[in-house]
């Protein structure tokens, strides 16, 4: 009896396997598909918003095999960031202000009454936060933006010197490209852990295995081109003399100008940032265009684009 059951189950299993094989072969012209790679061979597009085709590209040809989960996470991160950027542009169109959020300026979010969505009053280009302090606009008045307010108050526009410190800012501004600064800010500790504290010497020694580790790290923005640029830039800077990166960046600091009165009162990029980007590229750096260079100059205090009425500006030139 037991032997008969065994043979029955074995035959049934063979029939099922044969049926599945025939179904797959029949749907693919008699040829089994090649194994799909763990990751797609091309990075997500940087020059345009994500499209339905980008999502469809993540689907595997055989449904039971599921989805490429790492790439699906990348898509979700991008979609979230692009939605944030969309909201910022909508606010910009409605409020008459503009600029990058991060190294650059943030768009104000104004309601019809002249009050911000977070409750602050827009006055002379600034917005009053929940603590009553006037700040540059950009959603900083919202209760949920405490980390963004802290960055604005204590870091943005404060002079930064030191090769490793400037290398970190260059990397983070490059990773921000096409995204919201808040996306980067809230991953900054993850970036620091993943990139060895942005030590130029240590990052320059990263191996291909480290690059793959970074591509799988959910604590950072997993863009292959930007990760490759960060590693390449570290190798370039590692060959320079100590202090050379600091001297190069600060040699492009312009003379102090008049404080902008509105969030649209700064250039977004200028002759100095264009020249800085050109020099960095000439010396081997990647992912450093004029807009990114200007954002670096703002974030690191080479220029002070805090609005005239912003409480942070104080005695800064």
Image (spheres, helix red, strand yellow):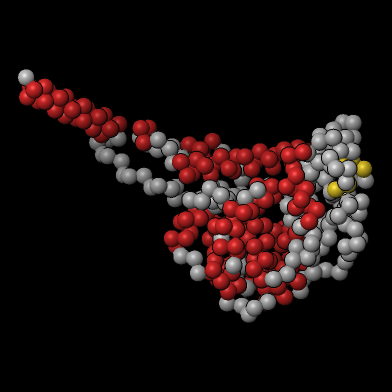
Residue furthest to the top in view is 1
Q: Which quadrant of the figure contains the C terminus?
A: bottom right
Q: Position of residue 183 (x, y in %)?
A: 65, 47
41 shown above or below 33: below
State left or right for residue 202 relative to residue 106.
left
Q: Which quadrant of the figure contains the N terminus?
A: top left
Which quadrant of the structure image shows residue 271? bottom right
Foreground pick, 6 / 114: 6
Q: Position of residue 95 (x, y in %)?
A: 84, 39
246 shown above or below 257: below
Foreground pick, 19 / 106: 106
Please indicate, yes or no, whether residue 109 appears anywhere in the rendered image.
yes
Residue furthest to the bottom in view is 241
131 shown above or below 272: above
Q: Name the residue located 44 percent from the left edge and 50 percent from the top edge.
A: 41
Which quadrant of the structure image shows residue 112? top right
Q: Name the residue located 9 percent from the left edge and 25 percent from the top edge.
A: 7
All told, the count of numbered labels is 0
Q: Position of residue 4 (x, y in %)?
A: 7, 22
Foreground pick, 210 / 178: 210
């Amino acid at each position: 009896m037991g032997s008969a059951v065994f043979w029955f189950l074995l035959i049934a299993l063979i029939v099922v396997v044969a049926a599945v094989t025939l179904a797959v072969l029949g749907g693919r012209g008699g040829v089994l598909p090649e194994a799909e790679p763990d990751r797609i061979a091309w990075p997500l597009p940087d020059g345009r918003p994500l499209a339905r085709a980008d999502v469809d590209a993540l689907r595997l040809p055989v449904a039971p095999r599921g989805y490429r989960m790492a790439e699906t996470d990348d898509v979700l991160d991008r979609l979230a960031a692009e939605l944030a950027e969309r909201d910022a542009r909508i606010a910009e169109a409605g409020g008459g202000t503009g600029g990058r959020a991060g190294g650059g300026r943030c768009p104000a979010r104004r309601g019809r009454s002249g009050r911000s969505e977070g409750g602050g009053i827009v006055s002379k280009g600034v917005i009053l936060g929940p603590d009553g302090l006037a700040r540059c606009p950009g959603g900083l008045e919202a209760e949920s933006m405490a980390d963004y307010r802290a960055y604005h108050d204590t870091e943005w526009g404060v002079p930064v010197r030191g090769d490793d410190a400037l290398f970190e800012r260059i990397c983070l501004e490059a990773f921000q490209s096409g995204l919201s600064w808040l996306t980067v800010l809230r991953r900054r500790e993850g970036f620091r852990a993943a990139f060895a504290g942005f030590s130029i010497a240590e990052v320059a020694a990263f191996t291909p295995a480290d690059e793959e580790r970074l591509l799988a790290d959910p604590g950072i923005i997993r863009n292959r081109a930007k990760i490759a640029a960060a590693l390449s830039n570290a190798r370039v800077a590692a060959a320079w003399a100590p202090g050379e990166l600091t001297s190069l960046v600060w040699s492009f600091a312009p003379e102090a100008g008049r404080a902008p009165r509105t969030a649209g009162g700064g250039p977004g990029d200028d002759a100095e940032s264009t020249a800085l980007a050109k020099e960095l590229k000439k010396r081997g750096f990647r992912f450093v265009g004029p807009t990114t260079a200007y954002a670096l100059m703002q974030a690191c205090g080479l220029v002070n684009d805090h609005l005239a009425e912003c409480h942070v500006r104080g005695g800064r030139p």
